[in-house]
Amino acid sequence: MKAAFGNAKNYFARFLKENKSISIGFAGVNVNIPLMENGKIKPSRKGFDAKDTTSPFVQESLGAIISFYNAYENAKEVVYCQAPYVETVPLKKGDAGFEFGIDVNEIKVRFLKAKYTPPVRIKNHFDKSIELFKEIGKVRKAGDGEWENDVTVKIADMNVEKREIVIQPATYFDQVGTNLTLDWASGALGETASYTLRNDIEKTVNGTLPRLKNSVLANTLGVAVVLVSRGEDVLIPIRGSEQAVMVDGKGKFHCSASGVFSWDMDNTNLADIDFEFFINGMAREIHSEIGLLKSEYSLTPLAFSRELIRGGKPQLFFIAETEMGLDELKEKMVGAEESWEFLSVDDLAEDSQLRPHLNSPLEAPQEMFTYEGWMALHVAMAYIRDEEPPFEIL
């Protein structure tokens, strides 16, 4: 079995019991954090060492991240569910989605015919990142023997007032060389070997993220979905450790499907792009990881957000609702093209901390989830149950 199933009603009963008020404190923000020094985040990894397959390329301590981006200390995403996301924009499509969200039918998508290119000052770091990811197995080869480097999109700007998203072509390697290696002191960013992209290139602006249109990072779009079966049961897979930023080989509970947005640029009418472009991208990811056809579920965009750990990398959160039963979903998932991304229950160690929660993963503590999965579940459950969302209401 590739996945566990949680019950939405049980999840909220537990959550509301533990959090009677959303004015909860955030542990770790107001204490001395050894991962910070002189207002900077200590490098999570140093030098080019292909034998080191475990040291992370980004800092995942939420306490350190919030100390660095200190303007977000009281952000609702952080306070409400201790997730590393900020500047979240609620969404809807017609009558589906958050009632108070922006209708994606009103959002214009503008395409810039100019592929993302890293600035000269980070090019050496960029190239070393891709080389090291190949050597330590963080990227895979396709069936033709070529390295997988899917075409994706950079979110060049998101303007809420204008109801406009600006995109331009980018690739998976572009995010490897920028957003995925922010805290690696590669020795290729200047005269000082300890320089990192986050501390010395993509600096904060008065404690906030740089605006997307001013960022030097690739800022490729990520998509994530929570699949709900027959209104109550939630598909919660166990994410493996082969993903680029994961180093914990034990795996963690995750959202139903997620990944970098991919698309076929040659078969896209670039003169007539709308938000359906992103919805179709999420549907492709669902088919690749779960094996479902678009006709087998309804798909609704719920939020656009920016992830602090990877330097403001943009993310779209969705919910998919299906009338298919749990047994059908299990069978579909086992045969999916990218089912390798998830661990089977049989792959877990006998003493795995996940085992006691396999029948009720929504009751598992936060540390047993990926941070992306944790945020995706909070967003989806707030929508399903008409509860307080983990972000500001516009």
Image: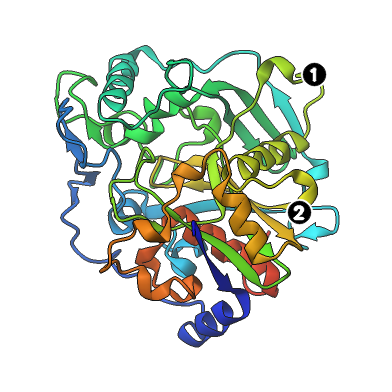
Residue topped by disc 1: 271
Q: What crowding class fits label 2: few (fewer than 14 Cα within 10 Å), some (14-19), or many (20 or more)?
A: some
Q: Is residue 25 above or below residue 112?
A: below
The earlier-in-sequence mark between 1 and 2 is: 1
Rendered residue at 61%/32% (across/down): 157
**Image quadrant of residue 187?**
top left
Quadrant where the C terminus sits is: bottom right
Residue topped by disc 2: 297
Distance between the alpha carbons at the discs numbered 1 and 2:
29 Å
Amino acid at dot 1 = Ala
Residue 392 shows up from this direction? no
Q: Residue furthest right?
A: 94
Q: What crowding class fits label 1: few (fewer than 14 Cα within 10 Å), some (14-19), or many (20 or more)?
A: few
Rendered residue at 31%/50% (across/down): 60
- Badge 2 element: loop
Amino acid at dot 2 = Tyr
* Horizontal side, residue 276 vs residue 37: left or right: right
Q: Mark 1 or 2, which is nearer the eye?
A: 2
Q: Which mark is residue 55?
A: none
Q: Position of residue 164 (x, y in %)?
A: 72, 35
Rendered residue at 69%/47% (across/down): 292
**Image quadrant of residue 358?**
bottom left
- Taking depth in this image into account, of 109 and 293 the one nearest to the observer is 293
Q: Is residue 190 above or below residue 307?
A: above
Does the CB distance between marks 1 and 2 fall below 8 Å? no
